[in-house]
Image (cartoon, helix red, strand yellow):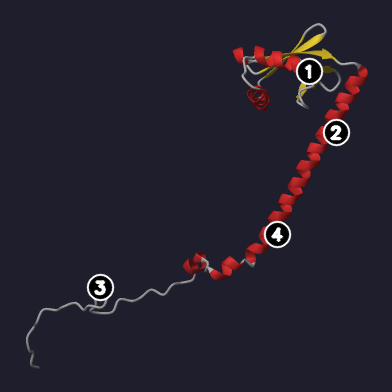
Amino acid sequence: MMPNTIALLDTGKFVTNGVDVWRSVMDQTSLDSHRELAEVANYEAYFARFKKSFTSGDLLVTKQAHKVSLDVGTGSTALRYDLYEATASERKADLKSALFWLADTVSDVTNKLTKCEEELSVLKKQKGTSSVAAVLPDIDTKKRSGQIKVQKQQGHSIVNPSSKKRKAATGVQFD
C-alpha cells in the first residue's frame, strides 16, 4: 500500500500521490471486456458499483515494479485496474487538471455556503416581523403572563360552579 495516496476519479483516468501519476487509458472495447469480466450486465450497474466503492473508501492501491494496481471494492466483486506510470507531460497535465478541479469544487462549495448564510440572516431578520407571528399569538407569552385564577365562591361546587351545595334543613329557629 502506498502512503499518502489520493485516488482521483476525474472520469477514472489516474491515481496520484501528489508527485507521481499512474494512469490507465481505456477505449470502448477494453471497457466492454472489463465490464464483462466483472460480470455486470450494463454500464449503469458497473459504474454504480465503482461509485459506491469510492464513496465508501473500499480502495486498495498496490505498487508493483512499473505499475500500480487499483482494486475498487472488496472480495470477489472487486474491480482491478492496472495503472502505468505517466510521462512527464501527462503527469503535469493530470496534476494541473486535478488542482483546477479541486479549486473549482472549493469555489462552488464556498459560494453555496455564502448563499446559505445570506438566506439564514434574512430569515433571522424576518423572524421578528413575521406576518404569521402577527396573526397567531405566541403561546409562551400567555403562559408567562400571570393568569388570573378564579376564586371559588362560598357555597358553590368546585366541579360544577353554577350549582350550590345543598345543606340539610335545620328547621325554623327562633331567637
Q: Secondary structure at mark 1?
A: loop
**Position in image of residue 87 (x %, y %):** 90, 16
Label 3 neighbourhood size at 10 Å, few (<14), some (14-19), many (20+)? few
Q: Which of marks 3 and 2 precedes in the sequence?
A: 2
Front: mark 4 or 1: 1
Q: Amino acid at mark 1?
A: Asp
Q: CA distance from mark 1 to mark 3?
A: 89 Å
Mark 3 touches mark 4? (CB < 8 Å)? no
Residue that label 1 marks = 27
**Position in image of residue 17 (x %, y %):** 81, 21
Front: mark 1 or 3: 1
Q: CA distance from mark 4 to mark 2?
A: 33 Å
Q: Quadrant of residue 40?
A: top right
Mark 1 touches mark 2? (CB < 8 Å)? no
Q: Amino acid at mark 4?
A: Val
Q: Which of marks 2 and 4 precedes in the sequence?
A: 2
Residue that label 2 marks = 100
